[in-house]
Amino acid sequence: MTKTITVLLAEDHTIVREGFRIMLELEDDLKIVGEAADGRHAVALAKKIRPDVVLMDIAMPLLNGLDATRQLLEALPAVKVLMLSAHNEDAYVQNACDSGAAGFLLKQTSSHDVCRAIREIHQGHTFFSPAVTRRLRERERRLPAHPGRVKPRNDLLTSREAEVLQLIAEGRANKQMAVELGISVKTVEKHREKLMLKLNIHHTAGLTRYAIGQGMIESVVQLTIV
């Protein structure tokens, strides 16, 4: 008898989340056990229900999918995370891998490949959308190694600093961030100062652009800061 794979859906767009739910409910061996509309809820829910696989959107409010994945895997290392994104740029794929995700899917991927990806990563393999895999293979053939490559963001920032960065990029004031994170305004200010020093970025617009470049928030926010 085939083992049922339990799945948690983490996606902030309701219509997209419903689409994935309808898709997965057609499969006898896949069972949706929870849904979350932001990264923070996804982490809390995963700790509670302990799914086999989490389908994690890369750009979500309050806590993006990259940092949610890091927090989730720190608490539940056996859980497999399949990252979802509308963007296929190399930086998004690299950041997903750096966060600990076992796979990366474009949202326009076929239902067959989504279900196949869930089964593959549950068995301990990795899985990327076919289009991403082809491009990465081509890139590996063309480019030499880059020993001087910039460190991924998770090597630069603490989990809390990353949360503060995202909230800054989402336009939250210090007082709002303090309430959201359950810390004092003074502590928020200290985190903001450390962020600017570590990243060598000294204004909010620059921090927002950095967050967009790292896939922490939707790129459409660029329209408000150019």
Image (spheres, rainbow, N blue to C red):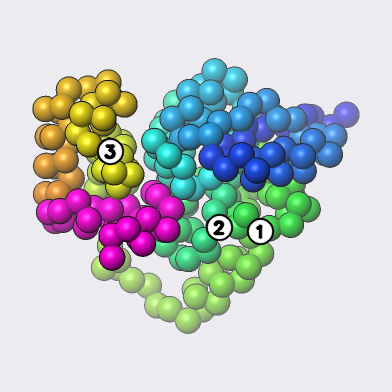
Q: Element type at marker 1?
A: loop
Q: Residues within 10 Å of mark 1 (few under 14, many from 20)?
A: few
Q: Nearer the viewer, mark 3 or mark 2?
A: 3
Task: State which quarter of the image contains the C terminus.
Answer: bottom left
Q: Please provide percent x and percent y for residue 145.
A: 37, 72
Q: Magenta region: which residues?
A: 198-226
Q: Which residue is mark 1?
A: 108
Residue 172, numbered circle: 3
CB contact under 8 Å: marks 2 and 1: yes
Q: Main secondary structure of the magenta part?
A: helix
Task: State which quarter of the image contains the N terminus.
Answer: top right
Question: Vertically, is 65 above or below 223?
Answer: above
Q: Which residue is mark 2?
A: 86
Locate residue 144: give its quadrant. Answer: bottom left
Give the CA distance from mark 2 to mark 1: 7 Å
Asked whether residue 72 is in view, the answer is no
Q: Nearer the viewer, mark 3 or mark 1?
A: 3
Give the CA distance from mark 3 to mark 1: 31 Å
> Does the magenta run of residues contain 30?
no
124 to the left or right of 207: right
Q: Please provide percent x and percent y for residue 163.
A: 31, 37
Residue type at mark 1 is Gln
183 to the left or right of 54: left
Question: Vertically, is 148 above or below 83?
Answer: below
Question: Vertically, is 159 above or below 153?
Answer: above
Locate residue 95: give its quadrant. Answer: bottom left
Locate residue 179: give its quadrant. Answer: top left
Residue 12, numbered circle: none
Please report the residue visible at 54 percent of the width from the left and 18 percent of the height from the top: 48
Please report the residue visible at 47 percent of the width from the left and 81 percent of the height from the top: 142
> Does the magenta run of residues contain 205?
yes
